[in-house]
Image (cartoon, grey):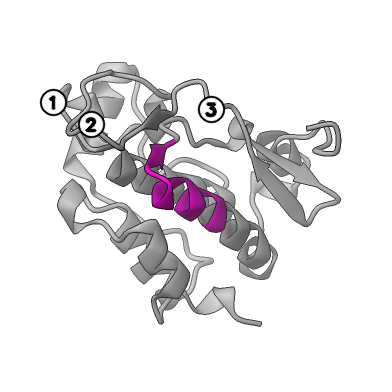
Amino acid sequence: MEYAGQQSMRGFLQQKRDGKMEEHEIKPIFRQIVKAVSYCHQHDIAHRDIKLENILIINKKTVKLIDFGFSINLKHKGRLNLFCGTPSYMPPEIVSKVSYYGKPADIWALGILLYKMLAGYFPFKGRNDRDLFRKIKQGNLAFPKNISDGLKHLLKSLLKVTPSERITAKEVNSFQYYYFARF
């Protein structure tokens, strides 16, 4: 951690014009985030609090996933019941207060994170938590104008309302429409 630096992705985005990044800037950063989450998932760890504040950025090109306070070892666990995380990043199953699997919850948070990096705002907003949770459960996405069709497809795969229909971290790393992983 002594090498990680002091700036979170949130602070980094606040310094950008309109609080967002261009697609070409996001490519290497998001790829690293997905690799970190994929590594955790391969070792049966769910982070459960993926958000801009929990990603440190070093020299505008290297990222570190931090704050494993809500993380859990899934090795001998089935569904989870702890209502945790940050409201804007919570998936429909958590805001509905039903038991859930940790890995698909992380995937939803990756989709929210990617959307925020691209658009400069969250895909779901509400006047209060109840209104926000209602919108999250509906899952109606409106895409900003500045994103490509391939990225829209990826966001749709990450932000499926039904957890079992969401792409996995491993699939994001290897799937062909994850086109921006290649340079």
User: What's the mark number on residue 98?
Assistant: 1
The quarter of the picture where residue 4 lies is: top right
Quadrant where the N terminus lies? Answer: top right
Q: Position of residue 156 (x, y in %)?
A: 31, 61
Q: Position of residue 39 (x, y in %)?
A: 50, 52
Q: Which residue is mark 3?
A: 68
User: For the residue marked with disc 2, what is the amino acid?
Assistant: Lys
Per the image, label 2 sits on a secondary structure element best described as loop
Q: Position of residue 5 (x, y in %)?
A: 84, 36
User: What's the mark number on residue 77?
Assistant: 2
Between disc 2 and disc 1, the foreground one is: 2
Residue that appears at 54% across and 58% down: 35
Between disc 2 and disc 1, whose residue precedes? Answer: 2
Between disc 3 and disc 1, the foreground one is: 3
From the viewer's perspective, is 127 left or right of 24?
A: left
Crowd rating for badge 3 (residues with CA inside 10 Å; few <14, some 14–19, many 20+): some
Per the image, label 3 sits on a secondary structure element best described as loop
